[in-house]
Amino acid sequence: MSVQENLNRIHQVVKDACKKENRDYNCVNIIAVTKYVSIERAKDALASGIQHIGENRVEEALKKWEVLGEKGTWHFIGSLQSKKVKKMIHQFDYIHSLDRLSLAKEIDKRTPEGETMKCFVQVNVSGEETKSGIKPEETISFIHDLSKYKAIEVVGLMTMAPIVENAEEVRPYFRQLRELKEKIEKLKLSHAPCHELSMGMSNDFAIAVEEGATFIRIGTALVGKEE
Ligand SMILES: *Cc1c(COP(=O)(O)O)cnc(C)c1O
């Protein structure tokens, strides 16, 4: 399947989900997760009108960025080692995996003077031990603690739902993330506007959009998976 055909299908699913919940379709951004595919395929994604590219490994991402960097908006979606921040901070526009103060400190240190880095705080809503992320009940206090790192801008919350048979089972996790985001928005913190929700992948993005996702991260269903 071409990326364009896949994208058309995904657009339709997003439209239907927005209609069902009375949401503005333009508020949902599609991130093409290109971690499984070649530079060529990532190029196809940009050519099909996709603006956002997501990668989860610094070295692999930088190879793609060298070729395609100027053309897109780059999202780092994987767990990030502090020592790699300095390598990627100039290439990426968003980090979706802020999950500890030591990482925030390093991002703060490496962000050019006078600029900010747009970050999502990753929350482990399902409580699975294999998943990274802040516990929901500790998220607000974590966000308060981030205020001392002047370069960190908390644009929203991110989560990864558990892998389930029936996508409907993940709805409570997405809903919980939205409710937490709304609580944080109400605090009106200058360093944490927190208007965005990064949630939903190939198998559950329709539910995520119904629950308020503003960034969906789609790999397999959009660009496929190459060996
Ligand atoms: C790989 C990955 C995705 C995309 O996964 P698909 O199921 O292929 O859509 C989304 N988010 C994160 C954090 C990922 O690591």
Image (tube, rainbow, N blue to C red):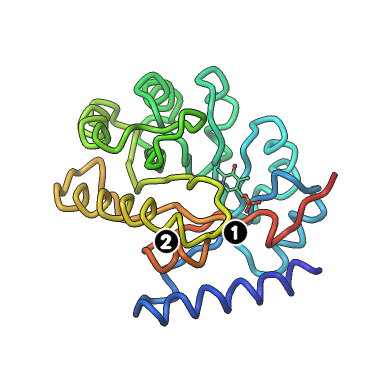
Residue at image location 26% in from the left, 43% down from the top: 192
- Point out the tag, 1 or 2, that comes first from the N-terminus: 1
- What secondary structure is found at the residue carrying circle 2? loop
Question: x, y (%) of residue 48?
Answer: 70, 69
Location of residue 45 (image quadrant):
bottom right
Location of residue 166 (image quadrant):
bottom right
Question: x, y (%) of residue 92?
Answer: 55, 41
| Dot 1 and dot 2 residues touching (CB under 8 Å) | no
Residue at image location 56% in from the left, 36% down from the top: 78
Q: Is residue 87 above or below residue 114?
A: above
Q: Is residue 137 above or below residue 69?
A: above
Q: Is residue 68 left or right of residue 139?
A: right
Residue at image location 74% in from the left, 74% down from the top: 5
Which quadrant does the C terminus fall into?
Answer: top right
Residue at image location 65% in from the left, 69% down from the top: 49
Number of numbered discs on residues: 2
- What secondary structure is found at the residue carrying circle 1? loop
Name the residue at the right extreme.
227
What amino acid is labelled 1 in the image? Answer: Asn
Location of mark 1 (residue): 203
Between the residue at mark 1 and the residue at mark 2, the CA separation in whole angstroms equals 16 Å
In the foreground, 59 or 117: 59
Q: Is residue 212 above or below residue 21?
A: above
Question: x, y (%) of residue 130?
Answer: 52, 29
Q: Is residue 116 left or right of residue 216?
A: left
What amino acid is labelled 2 in the image? Answer: Thr
The dot on residue 214 is 2
Q: Is residue 21 left or right of residue 145?
A: right
